[in-house]
Image (spheres, rainbow, N blue to C red):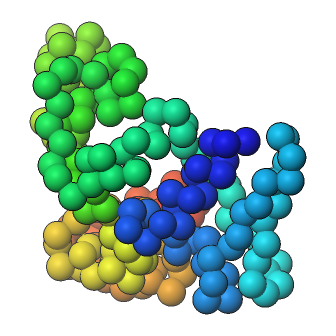
Amino acid sequence: MEDVLFTFRVYLDEAVHATQRDLLIVGGKPITVRKVDAQMVTFAFAKPYGVGERIFDGLAILPRHLLETRVQGREAGAERRSGHRSSPMGGTRGIFDSRSMFRGQRLVLERNPYYWKTDEQGNRLPYLDEIVFLFVPSADAQVLRFQSGETDMISRLGAENFFRAIAASARLHDGRCRARAGVPTFCF
């Protein structure tokens, strides 16, 4: 239960700039989350919202015990460069390792040169050297960055920005656009 409360506190914190925040604003106000007992929370919306339960489809519950110190600002505002080779959550190494994080701005992952998997020709995977995640405060800002060529992907592309993104994709990427599960969720 504490992880659920922590998750919504993080997603709704304006200083974090979580992309999920826009989804949690209904009627101009953030949804409220209240603990009822050890196994139940309630969610309240500022106004009736027929598709309210769909808001939770894409939200990951964050592990409070692993992330709370970072969110509380012990690393806020400064670039984090790890002296050890583990994931940002303290787990084992995967395909990418955390290289740096600017709170509310970006996360940079670098290729793990010791990752075990190879392709059919024996080349080590992954092929990418790094991935940069930009934390953009609104869907409109995501589309503007995509239109300018600053980003290569859009997450959670809404209907109101769909045609702007398609036009940018055609201009910047020779018209290549992909959809996942029949819904245009990102373009490149």
On the picture, is 180 further left or further right than 122? right
Number of marks in the rendered image: 0
Q: Quadrant of the C terminus?
A: bottom left
Residue 143 spot, x, y in % from top left: 33, 78
Is 85 above or below relative to 61? above
On the picture, is 76 further left or further right than 160? left
Residue 59 spot, x, y in % from top left: 60, 53
- Residue positioned 83% across, 84% down in the render: 48
Is 187 above or below relative to 97? below
Closer to us: 94 or 146: 94
Q: Quadrant of the N terminus?
A: top right
Closer to us: 177 or 161: 161
Is 35 above or below relative to 116? below
Residue 164, image quadrant: bottom left
Is residue 107 in sight in this rendering? no
- Residue positioned 39% across, 63% down in the render: 16
Closer to us: 18 or 54: 18
Is residue 68 in sight in this rendering? yes
- Residue positioned 51% across, 86% down in the render: 160
Residue 6 spot, x, y in % from top left: 59, 50
On the picture, is 106 further left or further right than 16? left
Residue 124 spot, x, y in % from top left: 17, 17
On the picture, is 90 further left or further right than 157? left
- Residue positioned 61% across, 89% down in the render: 28
